[in-house]
């Protein structure tokens, strides 16, 4: 007689805790790490400085304790349990190796010190943060809260000049293009809240209004790169979202598009129209400068393919070589991060840089596939929102001199935390489904 089929145990809500997981020190680690991410993504110190005239040094008071607590709690081990971190550290080490060969070693050294102190550390802060999936959820909500601060900042400090929205007194995201790229990254974290079936309509509706306002600000910056990024995000949604999400997205996009066209100044629309062949003097001149800088970055890459002109030295090298040739230098970095890296750090630096980004994206794609197989909706939604933000940001941010900003170590670190916590949750759920054979009766 054939045995009866096994009976599966229901999966537990949470995996078995690690020995130090519920220790009070873990809560301190998570608290400081979330605070450091909130302060940086929310651009909080600059906002306080504009409103009060006081430099609060919040970055040091949050990031310093966060990195120390993360290291003491094994965060470095967790960060380097995923391959993406090795790629990014290889890029940083290549920056160090390239510095002695720099056009200006002193300038490259200052960049290295600043990069470690204020940017690279977010790889470990974000990557070593999460042990449980609930901590990843808190991470997403923290960046969403920072996005709300960004939207309030946009409303308080917005100014419009020559048809372009920018922010007064905010250096990091005050520029129109920088503001647009930043919002393109944080808005999908707000979208994560709207996808949570446990959240009520009274929470989701204001969040949706915030997202709509954020899109209006992005379009109002008249950043052509950000406009392409929005289109790339729309294509990604139509490709990867569920049918219901596609319908809602198309309806919302059409509604926002009509309102945006009706509300934006004609100068803004004319500048954006340059993307599709219409004439706009300022946009045309900007395009010509970017084209020149892009060609120069390719030329410097070919001339110095191994170590480049030195980390952060493209603008100095371009300006000096032009002056020596009796011409006028532009003294700016190329508005394309990949040729900026290849010109500054050589082709090996570019390989490590791209490898880190691709590895981070791939680990989230694999996590999403695994979550889909086990029908874990929240992990699927988190992976989807992360990938949406990265796709849009890589389009917008790649067209700006953003190569050494904190964004890239942070998004790689977030991918690492998502992978660790999600796989632990999913593996625990799969392991709990063990066969129990009933007693045979003859």
Image: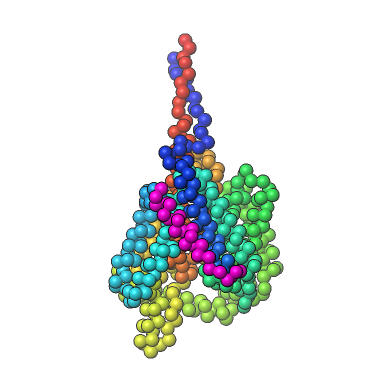
In the image, is residue 321 above or below residue 403?
below
Residue displayed at 44% across by 74% down: 333
Report x, y in % for residue 207.
64, 54
Q: Is 159 left or right of 287, judged from the image as shown?
A: right
Coloring applied to the structure: rainbow
Q: Is 57 left or right of 267, judged from the image as shown?
A: left
In the image, is residue 340 above or below residue 34?
below
Report x, y in % for residue 48.
58, 66
Residue displayed at 56% across by 79% down: 282
Residue 323 position by quadrant: bottom left
User: Does residue 67 belong to the magenta stretch?
Assistant: yes
In the image, is residue 238 above or below residue 329?
above
Residue 211 position by quadrant: bottom right
Q: What stretch is highlighted in magenta?
A: 50-73
Determine if residue 111 is in view: yes
Question: In the depicted view, which residue is nearer to us: 348 or 86?
Answer: 86
**Which quadrant does the N terminus fall into?**
top left
Residue displayed at 65% across by 51% down: 204
Residue displayed at 41% across by 48% down: 73
Determine if residue 215 is in view: no
Report x, y in % for residue 166.
59, 71
Question: In the depicted view, which residue is nearer to us: 396 or 119?
Answer: 119
User: Does residue 231 belong to the magenta stretch?
Assistant: no
Q: Is the magenta stretch mostly helix, strand or loop?
A: helix
Report x, y in % for residue 232.
54, 60
Residue with the most extreme bottom position: 326
């Amino acid at each position: 007689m054939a045995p009866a089929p096994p009976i599966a145990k229901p999966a537990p809500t949470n995996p078995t805790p690690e020995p130090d997981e519920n220790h009070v020190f873990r809560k301190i680690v998570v608290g400081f790490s979330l605070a450091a991410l909130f302060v940086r993504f929310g651009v909080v110190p600059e906002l306080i400085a504009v409103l009060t005239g006081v430099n609060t040094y919040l970055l040091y008071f949050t990031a310093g304790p966060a990195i120390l607590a993360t290291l003491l709690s094994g965060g470095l081990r967790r960060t380097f349990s995923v391959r993406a971190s090795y790629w990014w550290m290889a890029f940083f080490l290549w920056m160090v190796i390239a510095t002695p060969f720099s056009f200006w070693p002193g300038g490259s050294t200052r960049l290295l010190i600043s990069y470690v102190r204020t940017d690279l550390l977010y790889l470990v802060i974000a990557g070593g943060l999460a042990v449980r999936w609930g901590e990843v959820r808190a991470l997403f909500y923290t960046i969403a809260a920072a996005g709300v601060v960004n939207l309030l900042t946009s409303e308080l400090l917005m100014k419009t000049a020559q048809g372009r929205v920018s922010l007064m007194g905010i250096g990091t995201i005050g520029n129109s293009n920088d503001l647009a790229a930043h919002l393109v990254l944080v808005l999908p974290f707000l979208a994560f809240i709207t996808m949570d079936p446990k959240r009520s309509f009274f929470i989701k509706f204001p969040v949706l209004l915030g997202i709509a306002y954020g899109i209006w600000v992005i379009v109002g910056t008249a950043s052509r790169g950000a406009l392409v990024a929005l289109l790339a995000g729309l294509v990604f949604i139509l490709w990867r979202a569920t049918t219901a999400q596609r319908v809602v997205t198309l309806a919302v996009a059409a509604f926002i598009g009509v309102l945006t066209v009706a509300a934006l100044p004609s100068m803004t629309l004319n500048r954006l129209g340059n993307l599709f062949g219409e004439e706009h003097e300022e946009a045309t001149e900007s395009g010509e400068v970017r084209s020149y800088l892009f060609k120069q970055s390719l030329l410097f890459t070919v001339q110095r393919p191994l170590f480049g002109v030195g980390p952060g030295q493209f603008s100095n090298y371009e300006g000096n070589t032009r002056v020596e040739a009796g011409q006028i230098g532009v003294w700016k970095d190329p508005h394309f991060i990949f040729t900026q890296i290849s010109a500054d750090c050589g082709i090996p630096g570019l390989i490590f840089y791209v490898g880190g980004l691709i590895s981070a994206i791939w680990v989230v794609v694999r996590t999403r596939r695994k979550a889909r197989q086990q029908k874990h909706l929240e992990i699927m939604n988190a992976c989807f929102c992360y990938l949406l933000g990265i796709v849009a940001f890589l389009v917008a941010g790649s067209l700006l001199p953003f190569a050494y900003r904190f964004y890239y170590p942070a998004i790689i670190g977030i991918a690492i935390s998502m992978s660790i916590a999600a796989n632990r949750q999913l593996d625990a759920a799969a392991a709990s489904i063990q066969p129990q054979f009933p007693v045979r009766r003859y």
